[in-house]
């Protein structure tokens, strides 16, 4: 089969080019509008063309064998009186366009049917693979179910379960799976309250950045005093945000500074070089705010000593957490803090996002009490909390969901 593509100002000229190159038996496969006019894709079956061309000499040969020879059958001298061959008329533009559209519709319909058949076949194979896994390795299948109920992402769950031995008992498999996930989860420990640093709290609106700043500041003062502490009220967007930081500074006896924008930060931080802990409150922004990237770039340019930490509300859905992590990446966060853990209905999805992003967790906040509801993050404790939360909420993984998630990799798990 020969396939060609023709571009012309209109359909009439495109069809003429197809006829001239491929002949009247060509088939229009697709047609579409282009800035130059129309583009037509056509095809010609070589077998049909060869048969048509070989039919003419064969007929002539048969005629020469059967026709009697002699003067009576000599060619007449007069012109032939047979009717002239009617001229080939090109199809009207409207008819040609309709034919091309019909051909394109047929091709699209076939493609849609093939995709549907492929999806059906993949679903059938996934179901067979899942049933085979249930027969060969029931412990592995049960662990995939439980990790899905916890909210662990399918790729991470597959990696964890694939490491389990076929002879592992269910209780031991659970302990090994929790330990494996905890090893993948990065934490920093209580480094700020022990070593100090210049920390900028960044994140979306309403995640509790100012409350987190207050908890960290109070804990620092209780351990080290207020002399080496400085607070920067950089949230110029939310009404009353700077007043809250100033009130906290007066309560703790710590100095508070209010720059008008991030462009003033380098000079301000240079004056505060002797302070052991500098906490910077920043404006809350939606992850889809058009000015977010500009503000984060200004913060990143404030100096290499500034450690940005991404404040995330654990009550946020995992998909939104993933988008926030991606949008705030230009701030180059070195860690994150999980707030509102007490309001979360699931933790596995959030932990999966942080494991994929390789973003360490510094602290966990579970309430509004200052400073009690703040503790350093511990990996095993977080994973255990995710499991307990799934059990208490009655999370259940649907059988069809498990087949779709793990059917295509079930053969490699055990």
Image: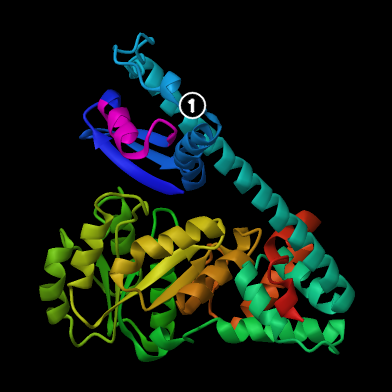
Q: How many marks?
A: 1
Q: Secondary structure at mark 1?
A: helix
Place residue 177 in its image quadrant.
bottom right
In the rendered image, the quadrant that contains the C terminus is bottom right
Residue linked to disc 1? 102
Residue 106, visible in the rendered structure = yes
| Left/right of residue 38 with respect to residue 372 in the rendered view | left
Prevailing secondary structure of the magenta residues: helix
Q: Position of residue 390 (x, y in %)?
A: 73, 64
Q: The magenta stretch spans which residues?
A: 13-28
Residue at the (21%, 82%) spot, across then down? 304
The one of 49 and 68 positioned closer to us in this rendering: 68
Residue 404's quadrant in the figure? bottom right
Q: Residue at x 36, y 60 (%)?
A: 327
Answer with the quarter of the image where residue 41 lies: top left
Position of 380 with respect to 283 (left or right) is right
Q: Residue 131, position in %: x, y?
A: 85, 66
Please name the residue shown 36% across and 39% down the image.
22
């Amino acid at each position: 089969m020969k396939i060609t593509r023709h571009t012309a100002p209109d359909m009439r000229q495109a069809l003429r080019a197809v006829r001239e190159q491929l002949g009247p038996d060509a088939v229009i496969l697709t047609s579409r509008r282009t800035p130059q006019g129309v583009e037509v894709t056509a095809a010609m079956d070589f077998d049909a063309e060869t048969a048509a061309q070989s039919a003419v000499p064969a007929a002539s040969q048969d005629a020469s064998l059967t026709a009697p020879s002699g003067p009576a059958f000599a060619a007449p001298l007069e012109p032939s009186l047979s009717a002239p061959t009617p001229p080939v008329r090109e199809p009207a533009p409207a008819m040609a366009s309709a034919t091309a559209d019909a051909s394109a519709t047929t091709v699209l319909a076939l493609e849609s049917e093939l995709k549907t058949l492929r999806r059906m076949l993949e679903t059938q194979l996934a179901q067979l693979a899942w049933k085979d896994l249930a027969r060969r390795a029931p412990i592995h299948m049960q662990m995939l179910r439980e990790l899905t109920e916890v909210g662990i992402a399918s790729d991470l769950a597959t990696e964890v379960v694939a490491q389990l031995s076929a002879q592992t008992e269910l209780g031991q498999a659970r302990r090994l799976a929790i330990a494996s996930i905890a090893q993948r989860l990065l934490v920093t420990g209580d480094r700020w309250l022990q070593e100090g640093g210049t920390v900028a709290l960044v994140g979306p609106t309403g995640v509790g950045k100012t409350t987190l700043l207050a908890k960290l500041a109070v804990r620092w003062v209780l351990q080290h005093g207020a002399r080496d502490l400085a607070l920067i009220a950089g949230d110029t967007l939310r009404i009353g945000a700077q007043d809250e930081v100033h009130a906290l500074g007066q309560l703790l006896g710590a100095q508070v500074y209010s720059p008008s924008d991030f462009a003033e930060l380098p000079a301000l931080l240079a004056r505060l070089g002797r302070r052991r802990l500098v906490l910077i409150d920043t404006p809350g922004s939606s992850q889809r705010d058009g000015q977010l990237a500009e503000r984060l770039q200004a913060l990143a340019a404030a100096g290499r000593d500034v450690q940005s930490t991404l404040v995330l509300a654990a009550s946020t859905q995992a998909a939104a957490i993933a988008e926030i992590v991606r949008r705030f990446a230009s701030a180059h966060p070195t860690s994150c803090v999980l707030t509102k853990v007490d309001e979360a209905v699931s933790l596995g999805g959030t932990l999966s996002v942080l494991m994929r992003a390789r973003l360490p967790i510094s602290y966990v906040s579970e309430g509004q009490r200052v400073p009690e509801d703040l503790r350093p993050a511990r990996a095993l404790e977080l994973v255990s909390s995710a499991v307990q939360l799934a059990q208490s909420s009655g999370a259940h993984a649907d059988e069809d969901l498990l087949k779709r998630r793990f059917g295509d990799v079930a053969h490699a798990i055990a």
